[in-house]
Image (cartoon, rainbow, N blue to C red):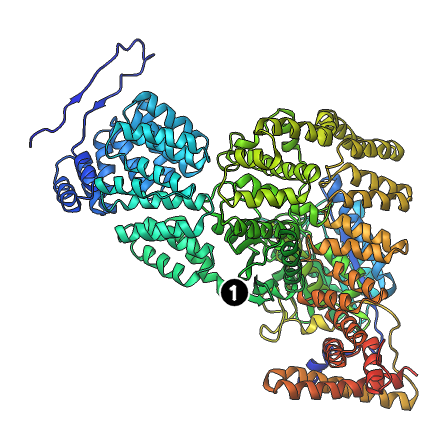
Amino acid sequence: MKRLFAVFLAFAAISCGQTKPAPIVEGRSPAEDCWTNRKHGQADAAKSCFDKLTRSADAYLRAEGFWGLGQFNDANGAFKEALARNDKSIRTRVRWGRFFLERYNTNDAGKLFEEALELDEKNAPALLGAALVGAEGFDAKAVEFADKAIASDPKLVEAQELKAHLALEDMNTAKAVEEADKAIAMSEDALDAMAIRATVELLADRSPQPWLDRMAKVNPKYSEGYARIAHHLVINRRYEDGIDYYRKAIVMDPANDAARSELGVNLMRIGQEAEARTLLEKAYENGWRDNPTVNTLRLMDSYKNFVTIEGTKSIVKLHKKEADLLKLYIPAELERAIATYEKKYKITLSGKVQVEVYPDHEDFAVRTMGMPGLGALGVTFGNVVAMDSPSGRPPAQFHWASTMWHELSHVFVLGATKHRVPRWFTEGLAVHEETAAAPDWGDRMSPPIIEAVHAKKLLPIAELDRGFIRPNYPNQVIVSYFQGGKICDYINERWGYQKLLDMMNDFAGNHPTVEVIERQLKMKPEEFDTAFLAWLDKNVGAQVNAFADWQKRMKALNGVVKDGGETDVIVTEAEALAKLFPDYVEKGSPYEIAANAYEKKGDKVKARKTLEAWANQGGREPGLIRKLADLQDEAGMQKEAAASLERLNMIYPVHDGAMHVHLGQLYTKLGNSRGAIREYEAVLAENPIDGATAHYELAKAYLGVGERGKAESNLVDALESAPGFKPAQKLLLEMNSGKKENP
Amino acid sequence: MRKLVLLAGLLPVLAHADTFYLTIAGLGGEADYEQRFQAQAKEIEKLVGASGKVTTLLGAEAKKARIEEAATEIAGKAQASDTFVLTLIGHGTFDTNTYKFNIPGPDITAAELAAVCNKIPATKQLVVNMTSASGASLAALQKPRRVVITATKSGTEKNATVFGRYWVEALRDPGADADKNESVSALEAFRYAERKTTEFYDTQKRLATEHAVIEDTGKGEGVKAPSAANGQGIAASSLAVLRMGAVQQAASDPAKRKLIAQREDLEEQIDKLKYEKAAIPSDQYRKQLQSLLLQLAKVQEELDK
């Protein structure tokens, strides 16, 4: 067999093993011709080329051949054999890594690229491979590796194309165009770069046709290019448009199961489940079994465990095991939020909003798979919202109502702007709406945010989108949410809420942030940044600057508490620390320490007032909220106690029968029979140990609203489990004697 | 036989027999556990004090010799018609062969604990073993008419348990009296504590390291959910761990006796109807049930005059 390549070995002088041997240089592989045929749409030539390789004596070439023919198990086996025969081969490692990457095994791919780089840290294809692995996870390292690959081999077109792709993901259109053009200048068949250029046009609402035509000249059926366009459209939340391009990708190449799977996942996102399932099942049957495909199919299978509750403007999907409880709270709050937003945004939604509530966080995570920087608690795809159930998280970890209002804001804003709104604005407005709904809702300023503000890590408004996609430091995503929210708070405060609506409507014209800032706020983005930072400093500067001191003093205070220190000392210091960093309302906060100390002193009034301040500041710990309600009830403040527990219903209404009983009792005392009914229904929904009392109280509440039939039915239920339950017996007798209309 | 079984869950104890409680808080090891175990023992003493005669052994007192001595004292006073409740709080160990309850001095094995219980002539007995690895003690302790509750399902569940906290809560919370007969049965207390323990791990999103079980036939495996299907729960439902409110005394007034007999008859009819619920159309069931409940309420109203 004619040798098609020569292997050159160069050895550096080795002195006592202190220098690595020079890397093996492996020449051009004949497999490259086969892949080029494929890329140019010459399917028959490619097939014949790959087929020939499968008969090679060289295991590596056989691997490439099998891979090209779609015989993946054989390909994997041949790669393994190839590496066993020549374990110094960088090319085999890199190509095997690329194979794994294509077959969605980023872990093994990453390891192979690492090994290759250990052999030769400047190997451009290995650096490119590492960049591609990073790109899968929206890791900042992807950019770093892509740059290194280009530095190592300035003619590596694929690395150049990757740079364009990454820039576009970062919403840096100008850079994306620049990098794509470099790739196109390098090579006539830089098809992925052309796809990037086409995407840029689409995102700007211009025709991509010239670029699609250029792609077609090289390969009239370049399915991967259309899938790449679709990917970017989806990243930009242009789901319908992305779906359109995934469809085109499949038409071009019906064997493109990666695109088929993505099409299914995205149809699922906008609520088109039937077609989504068909596509995903087909991809699965064809052997495409990546995590999104498998997990989405599993999730769809689990939908038989969900019940659907339809309202006037909403559809709520709840898991059977908690539907009886959550249906008492979520649908009503959703309808209230929709009505509020329709007024605020001056928009009437065309269809119903669908909210899916997942008790299993892993199911929720399936909905967000492959989407960078999305909320960990809720996500919106057009009119479909997916979110964690309050039962899906430890108590106090998230505020379900606040999250729902946040996501619902996206429904309106994405709809109003036809998904053209920049990420920072819709997230910022959604964060703003949380505290607009109730000042104690929304997330507080946490230590990672304080550290970022202190270290001046906030991004200029013109670049804020990037903070959501490819974080440069841990926590940059949550810092960006915070910053977006504060920006909208600032605009609202200085220019009024209408200005936010004006900006939203301006974004609907697909205008970039810089333009909209200048047009609507009459200032350059840089001026805005200066003004905003000055405002932010006035608002939070004191807390930020005092944080280091606060941390030291909190540590000391905790020590004093642990050692059983003097209560007066504890109270004084705890109150001072609460003033220094009022946003810190987490477990073990200074508020909690002070309240406990006051209670120990027997000063329930001050304990209550401290907890009221904590709650108003946004405290969410259920145990503390219940304690507050108890103190308020004890002080004769039933209305306030009810309000405290009602607040808890918006945070963590699950696994707390005692709370619902208490709230039911309060509503009964306050003459709010409807409220009492809801709360005792909540008690029963959790299958309580003491069902008899719950049914009895519910019976009384129904009598309170004149619903005798339901009252009697509940009395019978109470007595069914406790026939000797005297208060229920008495009420039954009274109802049957005709005396009882209202308790 | 079935009549007796059906009545078991409904009737409060009419002929008042005594209940003897022996509560033992074993070695804590660390100060935190020591304090917790002793606090639970003292709380149980306070809660059941009015329901019977209580012996509590804590700290250095909880040695094997003293335990056996306490059992002998109880044996000298108890009658066959009485009830005996043994509660174990602390750490247990299991070495694949033998369960041991950690106490000062030599630990006491499950077989030795069974011997302690066997000494006592009270026919109705309850052993609540709230320790780690307590599931391994069940086989040695089980006996006909003895209810055995363990905080863990086997000896391999070796972590400290939270079941004890909720068992004590069951004795404190009137809500544990699910059938409102003014007493908390072993079954009611078990269901309460088991449920709360499960909820504890669920809400904290932690893997449950304990699974409480109950066995009251003397020959089965412990179960988490006693029912007619697994044949467990009948003895436990008629063993009162705690009595609240006034204990009902059999009346000497013939008119009252007649009413009590009527009440018992109605309760039996209700129980029978509930037992046959699945086989009756729902509307018919509700109608019949309501009628019986109304009659029962009228009889109770007369009794309370």
The answer to whether B188 is drawn above or below residue A284 in the figure is below
* Res B295 visible: yes
Left or right, A237 with reference to A668 = left
Quadrant of residue A205 in the image? top left
Q: Secondary structure at mark 1?
A: helix
Question: What is the x, y in percent for residue A559?
Answer: 77, 30
Question: What is the x, y in percent for residue B116?
Answer: 73, 60
Write down the residue under mark 1: A305
In the image, B8 versus A741, the foreground residue is A741
The residue located at (75%, 30%) in the rendering is A554
The answer to whether B231 is drawn above or below residue A129 in the figure is below
Residue found at the far left of this picture: A1
The answer to whether B31 is drawn above or below residue B132 in the figure is above
Question: What is the x, y in percent for residue B111?
Answer: 65, 58
In the image, A401 versus A111, the foreground residue is A401
Left or right, B157 with reference to B124 = left
Question: What is the x, y in percent for residue A495?
Answer: 68, 38
- Residue type at mark 1 is Asn
Left or right, A331 with reference to B70 = left
Left or right, A597 with reference to A385 = right
